[in-house]
Image (cartoon, helix red, strand yellow):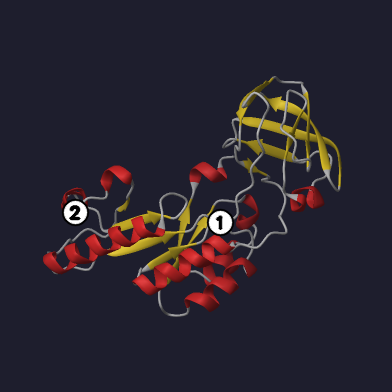
Amino acid sequence: MRRLRKAKIIATLGPSSSTPEVIRALFLAGADVFRLNLSHGTLADHARRIQIIRELESSVARPIAILLDMQGPKLRVGRFNADRVTLREGDSFRLDLSESPGDQQRASLPHPEVFQVLRPGSQLLIDDGKISLRVVDCGADFAQTEVVAGGVVSNNKGVNVPDVILPIPALTDKDKEGLSFGLDAGVDWVAPSFVQRPDDLVELRDIVGDRAMIITKFEKPAAMEHLKSIVALSDAVMVARGDLGV
């Protein structure tokens, strides 16, 4: 089965699209690559998907690529007494290392590495940029902020710090476990998440070797400052418009 078009289509598999029938239908509709998102599902789930894809590949006598998308480091606020709070523009809101549940005035941010690099004027984004905070004062274990764009913040929402390079490893223990699984299973591509600088790819390249290709996602503004070096260390790149937008 031959396809003449040069553009390729990547289809992400999830709980509702992981049966042999659906995966075959996606392939016949034009999917060239199947993406497995390690942020969701278990390794056993992904192993079943890989088996189905490889059986399909044999039946159609055409290569089908598998892309393993790693979760990367995740920053999250803690829990709240009432499960959520509503922040309004101009409110004062504190983030700190205390593990106690948050309220209208403060929340836990159990990531000391974030406070190491914050400065007055730094921006923090919560829940994919829905909530924007500006740092007014900060120290080794806290940041006092002003709410720039308000909204509802609920338990364990993600936090992004777009204008600084965070001193955190690009590969988490979970990533390494997933990567080992994927390479042993014979995936074709691996995609590291939240790459900030070229050094983030060096460890990955050492682990992967020639067993798979690396597609680097540009998700952090800091990565754009090292565009040429990161591209040189990658086999392909992906522009994550949503993450770059926040």
Residue occupying image coordinates x 72% and y 49%: 111
Residue 73, image x, y percentages: 60, 54
Q: Nearer the viewer, residue 99 or 86?
A: 99
Q: Is residue 142 left or right of residue 129?
A: right
Residue 235 visible within the image: no
| Crowding at mark 2 (Cα within 10 Å: few <14, some 14-19, many 20+) | some
Residue 16, image x, y percentages: 28, 42
Residue tagged 1: 72
Q: How many marks?
A: 2
Residue 62, image x, y percentages: 17, 68
Q: Is residue 158 left or right of residue 48?
A: right
Q: Is residue 146 left or right of residue 223?
A: right
| Quarter in which the C terminus is drawn | top right
Q: Earlier in the sequence, mark 2 or mark 1?
A: 2
Cα–Cα span, label 2 and label 1: 29 Å
**Tag 1, which secondary structure?**
loop
**Tag 2, which secondary structure?**
helix
- Residue 20: which numbered mark, if any? 2
201 vs 8: above or below: below
| Quarter in which the N terminus is drawn | bottom left
